Amino acid sequence: MRRTATTLLAAAIFGMLAPEAAPAADVYKLDPVHSVAVFKIKHLGVSYTYGLAPNLEGEFTYDPDNPEACAITVTAPALDITTEHRERDDHVLGEDFLNAVEHRTMQFRGTGFKKTGESTYEVTGDLTILAVTKPITIEAEFVGCGPVQEGEIRCGFDARFTIKRSDFGISAYLGPVGDEVTLMVGIEGIKQ
C-alpha cells in the first residue's frame, strides 16, 4: 500500500513537471469558390497575358504560435485553367504547354513554415508541374481568421511568387513567350 502511494505521488509530481504536449495545429479545407491563382507571363516582350487557375483544392494546417506545425497542399485542376480566349486556352492546355489531358493537376506541397513578420511567412515546399517536381520558396501573407455568419471558422492567406516554366520542361516559344511566370495565389480555408 505504501509503495503504491509513493508510486502515485511520483507520477503526479512527474506529471506536473513534464512539459505539456503542444496542441495540434488546426486543419482547414480549401474553399474552391474562394481559392484561386492568377498568373501572368510576358508576350512578345511588350505586354503580359493573364490567366486564371480557379477551383483550387487541398488543405492546410495552421497554428500561429507554432509555425513548425504548419503545412499546406494546394492542387490546381489543369483543365480549369483559362486565359479567357478559347483558341489560346486550347494552346495553353495542349502539348506545347501544360498538356492538361495527360497531366490533369499541378500541386504545391509546403512543408516548411518560418515566420518572417507579424503576418508574413516564408513557406518552402515542392511544386509539381508536368510530373516535374522542384523545390520553391514562397512569401505568404496571413490575411485573417475568424468566424463567419454560418458559424464556420475561416482563415486565409495570400502569396505572390515567380517560377521559370522551363524548369518544368515547358520550353515552347521561349522568346516570344516569356520564361518567367508570376503567380498570385489567394486561399481561404474552412476549419474542420
Image (tube, helix red, strand yellow):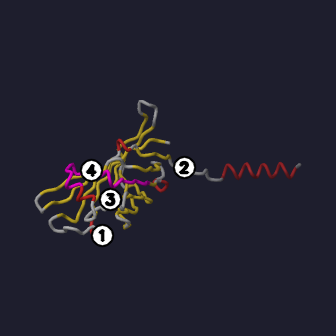
Give whichever of discs 3 and 4 has the lower sequence position. 4
Between the residue at mark 2 and the residue at mark 3, the CA separation in whole angstroms equals 37 Å
Q: What amino acid is at disc 1?
A: Gly
Image quadrant of residue 96? bottom left
Instruction: Please state which of residues 87 and 83 is positioned toward the viewer in this rendering.
Output: 87
Residue 5 x %, y %: 83, 48
Tell me which amino acid carries mark 3. Ala
- Whether the residues at callouts 3 and 4 have beta carbons within 8 Å, the answer is no
Gap between marks 2 and 4, in whole Å? 34 Å
Query: Is 128 drawn above or below residue 65 in the view shown?
Result: below
* Residue denoted by label 1: 169
| CA separation in Å, label 1 and label 4 | 21 Å
Can you identify the residue that label 3 sits on?
Answer: 100
Q: Residue 52 carries which label?
A: 4
Q: Amino acid type of disc 4?
A: Leu
Residue extent of the magenta highlight: 72-89
Q: Do the residues labelled 2 and 3 touch (CB within 8 Å)?
A: no
Secondary structure beneath label 2: loop
Q: Are marks 1 and 3 in contact (CB under 8 Å)?
A: no
Q: Which of marks 2 and 3 is nearer the N terminus?
A: 2
* Residue 73 within the segment the image draws in magenta: yes
Q: Label 3 crowding class (10 Å Cα cut-off): few <14, some 14-19, many 20+? A: many
Label 1's element?
loop
Q: Name the residue under label 2.
A: 24
First in residue order: circle 1 vs circle 2: 2
Q: Which residue lies furthest to the left in this view?
A: 46
